[in-house]
Amino acid sequence: KTGCEGDEVTWTISAKGEGLSYQWQYSADGGKEWNDFGGATTAKLTRTLKSIWNGWKIRCVIKDIDNTTIISENIYIIIAERWEVPVI
């Protein structure tokens, strides 16, 4: 996912099952260690992009009522420079 610092982005995930729980996570070290996004416990994650997130990976961990766990594919964050076309 590519965006510019300050852009608001939303990711959604779809899953079927009983008693599903969601936890969105990020990794700043290429996927070696994962940390929870605070309060990100629904099928939708909305955040405002920050330049420090450049290169981060984001994923969602989904568990069902039996504690079966599925982890989404990673989203790779690229923060692009915002540029404007000059007015002549």
Image: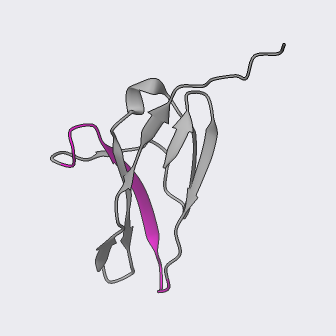
Residue reaching furthest to the right: 88
Residue 52 rendering spot, x and y as whole percentages? 39, 25
Residue 40 rendering spot, x and y as whole percentages? 49, 50
Q: Residue at the location (32% across, 83% down)?
A: 66
Q: Nearer the viewer, residue 10 or 62?
A: 10
Q: How many marks?
A: 0
Q: Using the rendered view, name the quadrant where residue 7 is placed.
A: top right
Q: Residue at the location (29% across, 80% down)?
A: 68
Q: Quadrant of the C terminus?
A: top right
Q: Is residue 28 above or below residue 62?
A: above
- What colour-coding does the image apply? one colour
- Relative horizontal placement of residue 81, taking residue 7 as reference (left or right): left
Q: Nearer the viewer, residue 23 or 11?
A: 11
Q: Residue at the location (32% across, 74% down)?
A: 70
- Relative horizontal placement of residue 56, taking residue 41 as reference (left or right): left
- Relative horizontal placement of residue 16, taking residue 6 as reference (left or right): left
- Relative horizontal placement of residue 12, taking residue 21 as reference (left or right): right
Q: Residue at the location (50% across, 32% down)?
A: 80
Residue 44 rendering spot, x and y as whole percentages? 58, 59
Residue reaching furthest to the bottom: 17
Q: Nearer the viewer, residue 81 or 64?
A: 81
Residue 72 rendering spot, x and y as whole percentages? 36, 68
Residue reaching furthest to the top: 88
Q: Is residue 45 above or below residue 35?
A: below
Q: Using the rendered view, name the quadrant where residue 30 is placed.
A: top left
Residue 19 among those drawn in magenta: yes
Q: Is residue 16 above or below residue 81?
A: below
Residue 18 among those drawn in magenta: yes
Q: Start and end of the magenta stretch?
A: 16-31
